[in-house]
Amino acid sequence: MPDPSGALWWPEQATLIVADLHLEKGSSFARRGSLLPPYDTGTTLARLAGLVRQFRPVRIVALGDSFHDGEAAERLDPGDRGSLAALVESCEWIWIAGNHDPDPGPGLGGTILAEGSILAGLTLRHEAASAPAGPELSGHYHPKASVSVHGRRVTCRCFMADSQRIVLPAFGAYAGGLSVRDRAFRRLFPIGFTAYLIGTRRVSAFPSALLLGDSGADEPLLPEA
């Protein structure tokens, strides 16, 4: 069940799944001279804590890039470190390694699993496989899509899904987005997909044929021949 927060709720497994938290992205940019407000980690963790109170999961799966870089966990301030530790201790916590954090969660508890681990028949990955052997969940691409609403272009984060895979949007407060028109998605969804666009209060499903093109273009998004 896609949630307006950007998380995926799996009722039968009482499992909450999130992707691309990118904790400490703000401090990473600050080290390179781009001074962003250093509140992204706290905001992201507060949103996740709200979902834990709402759903009461027995398991949380973080599908990689939970930290923005290999040293991000060391830069957590004491308050954010405590908030994350409380979340990890609240249930079974699974870290999937990502390209930004191949060794996530040092000293923070939980279980680190390699990409391609199986949970109740679903493969958990950070980056979607080109040809999955079975159903899979992944993140990595931070998908976003645009639709026309009363003649106005609206762009939202989205889930992308077909019969074999779901690609989750980025959950992190400072995570950007990649248009579903990007060629990176064409190999993953060669015959189309459903986009579940995230609104303020609900998630709305749109077939790929109804999605708009890149900004500045108004042609619909159609599967490639």
Image (tube, helix red, strand yellow):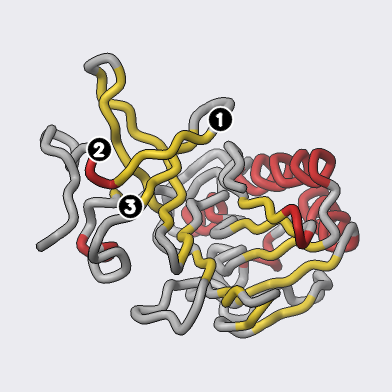
Depth check, front residue: 169 or 159? 159
Say whether residue 112 is left or right of residue 6: right
Proximity of marks 1 and 2: CB atoms separated by less than 8 Å? no
Image location of residue 79, percent across then percent down? 82, 48
Closer to the eye: label 3 or 2: 2
Query: How far, Cα to Cα, is label 1 from label 2?
Result: 18 Å
Proximity of marks 3 and 2: CB atoms separated by less than 8 Å? no
Classify 10 Å Cα crowding around label 3: few (below 14), some (14-19), many (20 and above): some
Classify 10 Å Cα crowding around label 2: few (below 14), some (14-19), many (20 and above): some
> Which label belongs to residue 202?
1
Identified at 68% across, 75% down, the residue is: 119
Res 24 → quadrant: bottom right
Proximity of marks 1 and 3: CB atoms separated by less than 8 Å? no
Query: How far, Cα to Cα, is label 3 from label 2?
Result: 18 Å
Disc nearer the start of the sequence (3/2)? 3
Image location of residue 198, percent across then percent down? 48, 36
Identify residue for label 3.
Answer: 178
Residue type beneath disc 1: Arg
Disc nearer the start of the sequence (1/2)? 1
Image quarter hosting the C terminus: bottom left
Disc nearer the start of the sequence (1/3)? 3
Which structural element holds mark 2? helix
Query: How far, Cα to Cα, is label 1 from label 3?
Result: 21 Å
180, above or below 132, in the image: above
Residue type beneath disc 3: Leu
Identified at 54% across, 59% down, the residue is: 20
> Which label belongs to residue 124?
none
Classify 10 Å Cα crowding around label 1: few (below 14), some (14-19), many (20 and above): few
Which structural element holds mark 1? loop
Identified at 57% across, 80% down, the residue is: 102
> Which label belongs to residue 210?
2
